[in-house]
Image (cartoon, grey):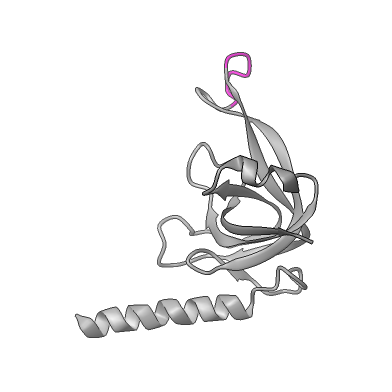
Amino acid sequence: MKTLALLLSLQLMNSCILGKAQESGLSESGGGSRLCYEPCVVKLTGQLVTAEEFGPPNFGENPDTDSKVVIYLLKLQKPISVRNDPQSRINVDSLENVKEIQLEFSRPLQDYRRFLKKNIIVRGKLFEAHTGHHYRKVLMSVDHIEGL
């Protein structure tokens, strides 16, 4: 059992190291490399913007009665590719030419509003959309934002 745990730990570490080596969002994200989904941490550059989308109860099926929600997006400077994770039940799709990423924040939004419409560097973990509240195919759980 310890051997299996060690092997899984080494495999995860290797996967993140490979993803880290390919983490090129800061300089050459369009250069053919592929970023990995969580648990890898990636850095991406782009502009922080908002978009309005339909929310509950029907997420756009009944526009007259559905609520509207504001989401935060990173409009990437260069499109990225994200490779699937065969061991995940969520991050199953490899995606190419991703130009926008929906951002998920752990801290209150007012901490980030000062970056709106500015070029920023965002650090976090990518994951694939899997609920009705996910409006883009790729999302990032944000750890850190800084201005350029």
The residue under the point 74% across, 61% down is 45
The residue under the point 69% across, 63% down is 44
Image quadrant containing the C terminus? bottom right
Determine whether 56 is above or below 34 in the image.
Answer: above
Which is more toward the observer, 137 or 72?
Answer: 72
Which is more toward the observer, 147 or 43?
Answer: 147
The x and y percentages for residue 53 are 65, 31
Determine whether 24 is above or below 37 in the image.
Answer: below
| Region in magenta | 60-65
Q: Does the stretch in magenta take in 64?
A: yes
Farthest-out residue, bottom: 3
Tell me which corner region of the image, top left, top right, bottom left or bottom right, holds residue 78: bottom right
The x and y percentages for residue 94 are 58, 62
The x and y percentages for residue 110 are 63, 40
The x and y percentages for residue 116 are 75, 44
The residue under the point 53% across, 53% down is 128
The residue under the point 56% across, 48% down is 105
In the rendered structure, the answer to whether residue 102 lies left or right of residue 132 reads right
Determine whether 115 is above or below 143 in the image.
Answer: above
